[in-house]
Image (cartoon, rainbow, N blue to C red):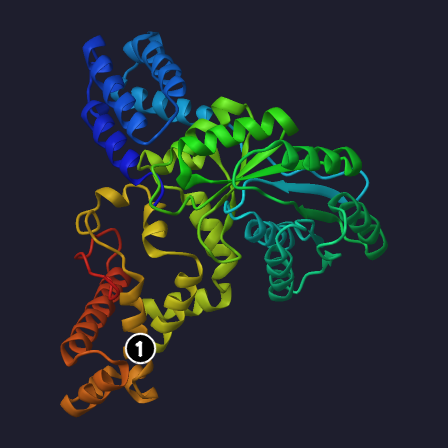
C-alpha cells in the first residue's frame, strides 16, 4: 500500500507528542527531526523536505501551539495542514471547455501506463461526470499502443479514433476533434507517443499537437514507483509543454510515496488523479486533504462513503439491516455482502480508510489476504441452498463434501461455521443491547 513506511513512521512520531499538555521547543525539535528522516526515507525531494520541516517548526514553536489548550493535538493539526498544502491544498477539478469538446492531451514516458490510464480516465468521466468521451490513438510509433487503446474501447464500449501507423499524429488529433463535434462527444482524450527518456523529437511532436489542437488539459502520466525520477520527468515535461496536471499511476503499489509529496512542490502543478489498482475503475480524483489524513492514520471516511455509494445496493442494505436485527442473516446474504465489498477495492485499503483502524486491537497486524476471501467464497458456493440457509444441518459427511468441493480442508470449513455463528450472536447482542459494547468478533475472512 502506498505510503505504508512513511505512514508508520509519522504516526509513531506524532503519537509521542499527541497527549502532551505542554510541548517544549525540544519536543518540537525531536519531532521535526523524525519527520525529516521519515520523508527522506520515503524518497521525498530534499529541498521539499527542508522547506516542509521549516514550516512545521515555525508554526509548532509559535503561538498557535504553545498557547493552545491542547498543544499536542495542535501540533498534529499543523502537520496535517502542512502535508495537505504540500500535496496541493484543495482538490483540483478537471477542465470543462465553454464550447465542447473538451480536449485532453495525455503525455508521458513509455511504460508509465499512459494508454491504460487514458482508458481509466474515459471510464471515470462517463461514470462519475456523465460524459461521453472519444479516445484518440495518436501513438503511431507503437502499433501495440493503437491496438491496446482499441481493445480498451471495446471493453468500455467507447469510440476510438485511429488512423493507423502511417498518419501524422497532428492530423489524427485534429480529425478526431472534427469527428467528436459531429458525433457529439463532449471530451476528446488524445493518447500521444512516449519514449524511454525525454528527447527533442518527442517534445517537438507534442508541441506541434499542442499548438494545433489547443488542449484544455495536458495531463502528464507518471509512475509513482519511480520516486525521484518521477519528479525529474514531471519537471522536464512541464518546462517544455506547460502541463496542467499530473496523473499518478501505481500509487497502490509498494511505493514510498515520495513522488506524490514532491511533484506539486517542485512543479507547482496539481496531481489531478491517482491510479489505485489495475482495474479500469481504479482511478480516483486526488484529494490532498484526504491523502494527508490517510498518511497520518486518521482514515478517509469520505472516500469510503463514496466507494460504498457506488457499489452498495440501498434496497439490499435495508433488507440486510432488518435481517441483522433479528439475526436471520444467512450465508447467502454474507456472499452478497462479500461481493459488494470486493467491488469497492482491496480490503486492506478499505480498512486503512477507517479512522484509527491501524490502532484497533486485532487489526493492527492483520494481513488482509484477498486469497482468503476466495477460499471463503469457495466454501459457501460448495454448500447446498439448505446448508447456506440453515448451517445447523451440517454433519461430518456434509462438511467433508464441502471441503472437497471448495479445495479446502474440513478444519477450514469448521472455522468458517464457528466464526459465522459468532458473528450472528454478535449481531443479536448489538440489536438487543443499546449503548452497551458487545464482545469483539473476528471477521470470517481474517
- Rendered position, 109 above or below 53: below
Taking the spot 24% from the left edge, 69% from the top edge, the residue there is: 424
Q: Relative to the observer, which residue lies in front, 425 or 122?
A: 122
Q: Position of residue 402 (x, y in %)?
A: 24, 85
Q: Relative to the observer, which residue lies in front, 425 or 91?
A: 91
- Rendered position, 273 above or below 262: below
Q: In the picture, residue 27 is in which quadrant?
A: top left
**Does 166 sit left or right of 395 as displayed?**
right
Residue at the bottom extreme of this rendering: 397
Which secondary structure lies at badge 1? Answer: helix
- Rendered position, 37 above or below 445: above
Q: Position of residue 277 (x, y in %)?
A: 44, 52
Q: Position of residue 380 (x, y in %)?
A: 30, 78
**Does 299 sit left or right of 403 as displayed?**
right
Taking the spot 46% from the left edge, 34% from the top edge, the residue there is: 230
- Rendered position, 337 above or below 42: below
Looking at the image, can residue 330 be seen?
A: no
Taking the spot 28% from the left edge, 41% from the top edge, the residue there is: 356
Number of numbered labels in the structure image? 1
Disc 1: which residue: 378
Taking the spot 35% from the left edge, 9% from the top edge, the residue there is: 58
Looking at the image, can residue 64 be seen?
A: yes
**Does 248 sit left or right of 394 as displayed?**
right
Q: Position of residue 440 (x, y in %)?
A: 18, 56
Q: In the picture, residue 74 is in which quadrant?
A: top left
**Does 167 sit left or right of 337 as displayed?**
right
Amino acid at each position: 500500500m502506498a505510503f505504508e513506511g512513511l505512514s508508520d513512521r509519522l504516526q509513531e512520531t506524532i503519537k509521542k507528542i499527541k497527549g502532551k499538555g505542554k510541548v517544549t521547543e525540544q519536543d518540537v525539535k525531536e519531532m521535526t527531526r523524525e519527520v525529516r528522516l521519515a520523508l527522506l526515507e520515503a524518497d521525498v525531494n530534499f529541498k521539499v523536505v527542508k522547506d516542509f520541516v521549516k514550516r512545521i517548526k515555525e508554526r509548532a514553536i509559535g503561538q498557535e501551539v504553545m498557547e493552545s489548550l491542547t498543544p499536542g493535538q495542535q501540533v498534529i493539526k499543523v502537520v496535517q495542514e502542512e502535508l495537505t498544502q504540500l500535496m496541493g491544498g484543495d482538490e483540483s477539478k478537471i477542465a470543462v471547455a465553454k464550447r465542447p469538446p473538451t480536449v485532453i492531451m495525455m503525455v508521458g514516458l513509455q511504460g508509465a501506463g499512459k494508454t491504460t490510464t487514458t482508458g481509466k480516465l474515459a471510464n471515470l468521466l462517463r461514470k462519475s461526470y456523465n460524459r461521453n468521451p472519444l479516445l484518440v490513438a495518436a501513438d503511431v510509433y507503437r502499433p501495440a499502443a493503437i491496438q491496446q487503446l482499441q481493445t480498451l474501447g471495446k471493453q468500455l464500449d467507447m469510440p476510438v479514433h485511429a488512423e493507423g501507423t502511417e498518419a501524422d499524429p497532428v492530423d489524427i488529433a485534429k480529425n478526431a476533434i472534427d469527428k467528436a463535434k459531429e458525433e457529439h462527444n463532449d471530451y476528446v482524450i488524445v493518447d500521444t507517443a512516449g519514449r524511454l527518456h525525454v528527447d527533442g523529437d518527442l517534445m517537438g511532436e507534442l508541441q506541434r499537437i499542442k499548438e494545433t489542437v489547443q488542449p484544455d488539459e495536458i495531463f502528464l502520466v507518471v509512475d509513482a514507483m519511480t520516486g525521484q525520477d518521477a519528479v525529474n520527468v514531471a519537471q522536464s515535461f512541464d518546462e517544455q509543454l506547460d502541463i496542467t496536471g499530473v496523473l499518478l499511476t501505481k500509487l497502490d503499489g509498494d511505493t514510498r510515496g515520495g513522488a506524490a509529496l514532491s511533484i506539486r512542490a517542485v512543479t507547482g502543478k496539481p496531481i489531478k488523479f491517482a491510479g489505485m489498482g489495475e482495474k479500469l475503475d481504479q482511478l480516483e480524483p486526488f484529494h490532498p486533504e484526504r491523502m494527508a489524513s490517510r498518511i497520518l492514520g486518521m482514515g478517509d471516511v469520505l472516500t469510503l462513503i463514496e466507494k460504498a455509494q457506488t457499489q452498495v445496493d440501498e434496497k439490499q442494505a435495508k433488507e440486510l439491516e432488518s435481517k441483522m436485527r433479528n439475526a436471520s442473516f444467512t450465508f447467502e446474504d454474507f456472499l452478497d455482502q462479500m461481493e459488494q465489498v470486493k467491488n469497492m477495492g482491496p480490503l486492506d485499503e478499505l480498512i486503512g480508510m477507517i479512522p484509527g483502524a491501524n490502532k484497533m486491537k486485532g487489526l493492527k497486524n492483520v494481513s488482509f489476504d484477498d486469497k482468503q476471501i476466495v477460499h471463503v467464497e469457495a466454501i459457501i458456493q460448495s454448500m447446498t441452498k439448505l446448508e447456506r440457509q440453515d448451517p445447523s444441518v451440517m454433519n461430518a459427511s456434509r462438511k467433508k463434501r464441502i471441503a472437497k468441493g471448495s479445495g479446502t480442508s474440513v478444519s477450514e470449513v469448521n472455522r468458517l461455521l464457528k466464526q459465522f455463528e459468532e458473528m450472528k450472536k454478535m449481531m443479536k447482542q448489538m440489536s438487543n443491547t443499546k449503548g452497551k459494547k458487545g464482545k469483539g468478533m473476528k471477521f470470517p475472512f481474517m
